[in-house]
Amino acid sequence: LGARLAFIVAHVTYYSTRKHEMLNFSSGGLWWPGAAVGALLVMVVIGMLQKEKIKETFDRFSIFLLPAGLSFWLASWSAGIAYGARLDPSVWWGMPMLDITGVTAPRVPVQPAAAFTLLLILGATKWLWQKPVPTGRRMGVLMLVLSVHTLLFSLLRADPVQPLLGIRLDVWASILLVIVAGALVGCSFEVKSRKTQPQEELD
């Protein structure tokens, strides 16, 4: 629902005259920033319902970050979105990629490269990181890795996305996700309060 709402907001001009299409999920139109925001809100609500254990809830849901990221890039590959720039057929490392118009042409293989590197980086991080850490830090670090990865590959995308101040909306969303992830990491470091010395009573 969050992904659909974000897509509608990003294309509000189109849907302002086609309100009957807003709930037509079969026509496509999902945007990952909305899914990310929706997931974070659901985790907060679940954590609040479980005796304010929000950080613990974040850590439990961190297991879904890798499959969520992989599914985005693989689904984008098959759907012909989030593709790279078109290449000359003579470029050996170019791959035939489907674009938003249905045309297959040699392009920078952004989606498969993103999926493969995400599997290596985030998968290796989760596999090697076995030691216990403060509550909330695992989700923060893994989300930071995912968000930085998403930002880097968003800069390589060549599919048309609405800009804001000359920058693609998906890049802005990735930057915001980096900030949120950094805040989660920061919140995992508890500041120890200084012990106040007892004051001597004056006669």
Image: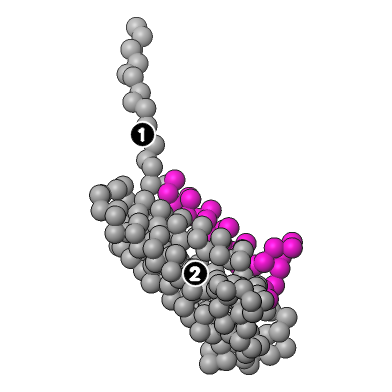
Instruction: Tell me the residue that label 1 is attached to.
Output: 192
Q: CA distance from mark 2 to mark 1?
A: 43 Å
Residue located beneath label 2 in the image: 113
Crowdedness of circle 2 by 10 Å Cα count: few (<14), some, many (20+)? few
Main SS class of the magenta portion in the image: helix
Tag 1: amino acid: Lys
- In this rendering, position of residue 178 left or right of residue 165: left
The answer to whether residue 185 is magenta is: yes
171 vs 195, left or right, is right
Q: Tag 1 or tag 2, which sits nearer the N-term?
A: 2
Residue 17, x across and y down, in percent: 72, 88
Tell me residue 132's x, y (percent). Answer: 25, 49
Label 2 residue SS: helix
User: Is 126 part of what is drawn in magenta?
Assistant: no
Q: Position of residue 51 (x, y in %)?
A: 30, 58
**102 left or right of 115?**
right
Q: Is residue 86 visible?
A: no
Q: Quadrant of the C terminus?
A: top left
Callout 1 secondary element: loop
Q: Residue at x 36, y 34 (%)?
A: 192
Residue range (magenta): 160-186
Tell me where residue 34 appears, x and y as whole percent.
53, 72
